[in-house]
Amino acid sequence: MKYSLICLFLLSIISISCKNSATLITEKKETGYQGQGASPVVPTVDRPVQKQWKGIWSQENKTYFSNDFDGARLNGVAFDGNDHYTVWITAENTPINVSPWYSFKVWTENPREITIKLSYQDSRSRYYPKLSLDGVHFKPLDSTAYKIINPGEGEFGIKAAPEFAEIALNIDNNPTWISAQELYTSKRVQNWVDSLSIKPFVSNYEIGKSHENRAIQLMEIKENPSTKKALMIISRQHPPEVTGFLVMKSFIETITGDSPQAKEFRNKFDVFAVPLMNPDGVDNGHWRHNMGGIDLNRDWENFNQPETRSVRDFLNKKSDAGYEFVFGADFHSTWDDIYYPIDSTVIGEKGKIVYDWIKSISNRLPQKRTNIAPSNKIKPTMVSRNYFYVNHGMPAIVFELGDNTPRNFLKEKGKVAAEEIMRLLLAD
């Protein structure tokens, strides 16, 4: 079927054969997703943000739409006749990177099939719809119920996405959630953190506040009181980037597991993690920014935003206390799986562990090798990876996962990534 599982977004990534960190870069074929270009330097002083109206839209035939929950994004609904509805999705501010997040509920007093058209402000239909009956467990919409309108061009990026999308949905008096990705709000993330904190070597505590006074929560994995070597892990600077969070989640669960390798690793290394860097953006259903109207991953030079300042101050405190940071990772999502390390010509021998790590993951998961786009520009620091390295000598990487990478593979990739970095650091 032409539109089956929105094939425009589900192309496989090329294989990368490599013998060492140098060939890992030079042998990369110029096919598949090549990543985005260099990030422009942008101001990070607060910009206005428009908060969406929250409530319930009452439509014809006693049908209702709601955005009255954390993580929702719905800005308008219109009844077009013949059980057809158009919903409008707008961003928190502009200009903005094209991550058109949506999440809303629909139900009716007259059970039937309806059609919903997804329409966006200055964007196209990037995310394939996920459905849930409880707001927690989601699954992709059946491809037979999905129709694209005005297909895009190319293989990757917003221009490849359809201009609009329509979904057919059977509804009744029990709400159905329709969401761009699974909902992992600040409350749900904190519940996950708390569940791991039952372990005696895991704790979590606040290191700062967001614009709306939500906690910037840090998870600390520390089993040996005398340890002074550590990893720094962050996730969810950009609210819609759930697949990156899911890999990070599996990564942390593996390190906190009961395997002999994990136990040995925790005896020699600590792990500090901020699983949710942008709680305001997540809970407000933002496309990209925090409540300061800023892309947090452009603020690692000037630190105008409270979220980035919280991590900066924490790292400075630990460095002053004698910690050596041996690895850093910032988990994100994009059009397909890709690594963004610092170029080996810049980071040299210190960064070898990053390239060895990429190679070892690729060797264990040959069914879906991941492209690599190294950067040789580390100043201004601006993005987390550069700040980690320049200011704390930390070999660091931006680890991006595809929007539509299968969820079981994401879990496996997070597990393998954790096992391989533990193996490499223990062997060092």
Image (tube, rainbow, N blue to C red):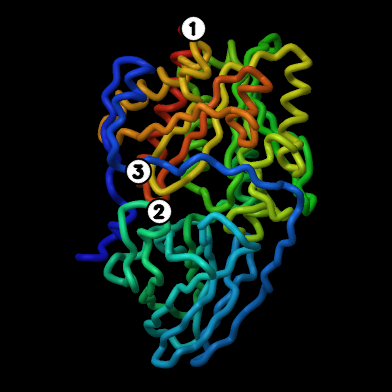
Quick check: can you spot residue 223?
no
Q: Marks 3 and 1, how far apart in space?
A: 32 Å
User: Which badge, 2 or 3, comes first in the chain's sequence?
Assistant: 3
Q: Give yes or no for contact between labels 2 and 3 (Cβ–Cβ under 8 Å).
A: no
Question: Disc 3 marks which residue?
Answer: 33
Residue 214, compared with residue 103, is above or below; it is: above
Q: Amino acid at mark 3?
A: Tyr
Residue in view at x 74 percent, y 61 percent: 48
Question: Disc 2 marks which residue?
Answer: 157
Check the image and name the residue furthest to the top.
Answer: 428
Q: Residues within 10 Å of mark 3 (few under 14, many from 20)?
A: many
Q: Amino acid at mark 1?
A: Asp
Check the image and name the residue furthest to the left.
Answer: 1
User: How far across and how far down the image is residue 219, in percent?
Assistant: 66, 32
Give the side of residue 34 with respect to residue 283, left or right: left
Question: Disc 1 marks which residue?
Answer: 428
Query: Residue 127's quadrant in the figure?
Result: bottom left
User: How far across and how far down the image is residue 228, in percent?
Assistant: 67, 12
Residue 9, compared with residue 120, is above or below; it is: above
Residue 204, compared with residue 171, is above or below; it is: above
